[in-house]
Image: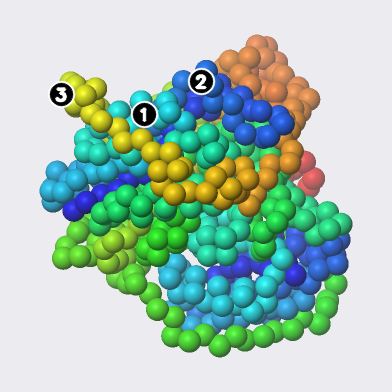
Amino acid sequence: MIMVLNNRVDRSSLELLSKARKLADKASMKLSFLLISNSKKNVEELARFGPDVVILALHERFERFSLDPFLSTSKKILEKYSPSIVLAPATTFGRTLMPALAATFRTGLTADCTELDVDEKGSLLQTRPAIGGNVMATIVTPFHRPQMATVRPGVFEIEEHKKRDTIFIEEPVENPEDRCQLVRVEPKQAGAKLEEAKIIVSVGKGLRKKENVELAFRFASLVKGAVGASRAVVDARWLSHDHQVGLSGKTVKPKIYIAAGISGAVQHLAGMQTSEIVVAINKDRHAPIFRVADIGIVADASWALSELIRRLERDDDGSRQ
Amino acid sequence: MNVLVLVKQVPDTEKVKIDLDTGTLIREGLDITMNPLDAHALELAVSLKEKHGGSVTVLSMGPMNTVDVLRSAIALGADRAILLSDAALAGSDTWATSLALARTIQKLSIQYDLLVCGEKSTDGETGQVGIELATLLNLPVISYVSELIEITEGFVLVRRSVEDAYEIWKAPLPVCLCVLKSVAEPRLPTLSGKKKAMDARIEIYNAKDIGIDPEEVGLKGSPTRVVKVFNTKVSRNCTIYEDKDVPEGINRLVELIRRALEGEPV
């Protein structure tokens, strides 16, 4: 059995279910989705993405993720169903719960996978970027069960599967204890929505100064896109970490990815190589970013963005040629 | 307030090489440094000691040259430095590493109110050891801590940064905090700190000292195995527009954007 864990039915759940369905078919395994949550919201929707079983562990305590109650509940359910493979999104939820589960079950865990496969024996082949994105490593867990992996959101396509008779099971949850106490929640401003944008303009230090980042936002608003950033820009605090694209940031796959003033460190490339068309704008003709771009414009990035804005604003005025 | 900080030595990831047979890092001959994210954890620990008294212990597992990294931690304000080093530990995955560290903490009866670790290392980038270790020690864990707000009467109040919100959590001591960079900005070592570090004793233990069975750590004791390492092929055929062709490149980009906006295939 392959089991996918999450605390809400979101994009990352559907991506993982879509991928896991293919793995389950290949290895003739069952696919289950375990939702540990305070809400059944959107749960019916899951059936379209292929799970054989949906297991619900519902309790008001599960409104926000906290390790103690999620660990004790998932531990009991994993013991009961003993899945061979356990997957979770590499979100703050998965990256916290999964190591604790791996320690509890004395098994292996591979972080941040970008590719998954199973062999005929049901061994999970877990592939992830390693050593700063310089290489990819494929990892297996030969003798310990379950085999566990967290998976980068945004890597797998969401695919609907032909309708099957998904069984919904509600597991009782006894009042789960938590040594920690949630005092309050302060919602964040709507993020950069990088994962969903069709057009992304990512900025690097080649923009020369913080004020020029405003150009990227003006451009993004004209094309209803999102603004990404290189690690250098985030480190320099020109933009928050929410914008970071790359190994320690987000993985994106827009239709058009514009790298403006980004030289193209491997860590950055690891997060954007899934884009459909890559456009690089950089003054340095020899910047590595051009090797992974479809279109390269050798120019000052701030100038090029201003030029693009000027052209697109003219479109908006209805004076398109 | 006694704080235990996990520190890891990391190679410069730009220059790193890998052993294609075992899939592990070749660490020989590389410049090593303290994992940059651990420096933020250490700074938090030292600033807490300065405010509340107590001590800061740094704990690491790694080859013998990790001593240099531990000395730099003392120069930055740590009081005690412990290194677990043994050839039998080489190749340990996160589970085996966590087990070895948990045994060390138990065997040496290290006292702590807070266990602080950086979000992840810049080489392995798993972010798993802190949480696996805390689970083995049965500690409560708060991950993605962006700010330590205050410590009062056996509790810590922290701000946690998750995808959609900041959450304020109150946790009882002892607790494990996995911290983000924003918790503290690392200081530079002082001259007196450097002098202190030169004379400091680094406690070094091997697997036998701690009572670790070599079979349960290292490559042998690790549940995961690297079976293949390969280079990423990300090259595309780039059409370059430069000098007088730049306007043509901009035109092409504008055309692509228009098509994408109109929902046509780009």
The residue lying toward the viewer, choosing from A130 and B207, is B207
Quadrant that contains the N terminus of chain A: bottom right
The residue lying toward the viewer, choosing from A90 and B59, is B59
Circles 2 and 1 on the same subunit: yes
| Kind of residue indicated by mark 3 | Ser
Give the residue drawn at x 32%, y 49%.
B108
Q: Chain of mark 2?
A: B
Question: Do callouts 2 and 1 mark residues in contact (Cβ within 8 Å)?
Answer: no
Res. B30 mark: 2
Name the mark nearer the viewer: 2 or 1: 1
Question: Do callouts 2 and 3 mark residues in contact (Cβ within 8 Å)?
Answer: no
Q: Mark 2 or 1 closer to N-term?
A: 2
| Kind of residue indicated by mark 2 | Leu
Element assignment for label 2? loop
Percent coordinates x, y for residue A207 in the rendering:
48, 26
Q: Quadrant of residue B166?
A: bottom left
Q: Is residue A144 left or right of residue B175?
A: right
Give the residue drawn at x 40%, y 60%.
B137
Q: How is the image coloured?
A: rainbow
> Is B130 located above or below residue A28 in the figure?
above
Assess disc 2: are there few (<14), some (14-19) or many (≥20) residues with their C-alpha within 10 Å of its C-alpha.
Answer: some
Element assignment for label 1? helix
State the residue position of label 3: B192
Q: Mark 2 or 3 closer to N-term?
A: 2
Percent coordinates x, y for residue A88 in the rendering:
61, 61
> Is A302 located above or below residue B39 in the figure?
above
Res. B67 mark: 1
Assess disc 3: are there few (<14), some (14-19) or many (≥20) residues with their C-alpha within 10 Å of its C-alpha.
Answer: few
Element assignment for label 3? helix
